[in-house]
Amino acid sequence: MKEISKLGLILLLICAVAAGLLSLVYDFTIDKIVEQREMTSQLSRQEVLPDADSFEIMEAGMLDKVKAGNELVVEIYEGLSGGTLVGYTVKSLPGGFGGSVEVITGISVDGTVTGMRVGNHQETPGLGANATLPDFYGQYAGKSTESELTVVKAGAAGNEIQAISGATITSKAVTEGVNMAVEAYKIVSGL
């Protein structure tokens, strides 16, 4: 019995030291992680709204108004070119196959989707993760905000998006995220 207690105390000590070291590493790296995430978000905003040369976060009151209609919209930025509004970027978090999918959508002031990118996700590698490839996300550019986007398995036309083969749930989630962005755009622009 004494031997089991001794082994238990040794295991407890090892776990406590490991937890303490993990905590120190976390404290040391969290600022870099946050900085890297912000740089990635800034790059994504620039990719989905290329006409903008700067971005300003939407005022809290307007974001709250959008979130009242859809809590999965997490941020909205105004895209500016020389101080003139050229469009908006909207980040939403629809539910995919493996969890939330971060969808960043750009919409110009004239109501055209200028681009879409998928950020953090837990989708299946080789299937749902293909939403990050240009063959898929390129379908969204140029789509109108006049009607809702839908997912089809083959032969996409108009405001239809062709699903990723074997990843229909992810395709629908990403498209839902873009549709959320369109609804946010309509609220923000007063349409």
Image (cartoon, rainbow, N blue to C red):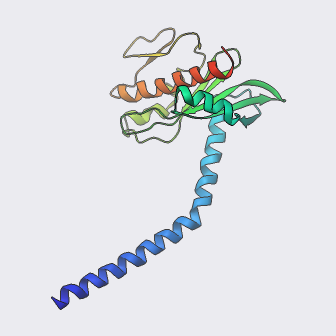
Q: Position of residue 3 (x, y in %)?
A: 19, 89
Q: Is residue 83 left or right of residue 190?
A: right
Near-viewer residue (64 or 30): 64
| Residue at the far left in the pictured view | 1
Residue 46 visible somewhere in the drawing = no
- Say which of 9 and 101 sits in front: 9
Q: Residue at x 49, y 69 (%)?
A: 23
Where is residue 47? Give x, y as percent: 64, 32
Outermost residue, right direction? Answer: 82
Q: Which quarter of the figure has residue 53?
A: top right
x and y, in percent, of residue 8 in the image? 26, 82
Is residue 86 visible in the rendered image? The answer is yes
Q: Vertical placement of 182 versus 73: above or below?
A: above
Residue 96 is left or right of residue 4, and the answer is right
Q: Residue at x 57, y 63 (%)?
A: 29
Identify which residue is drawn at 51% across, 12% down: 159
Say if 190 sits above or below 93 in the image.
above
Locate residue 6 relative to residue 127 in the image: left or right.
Answer: left
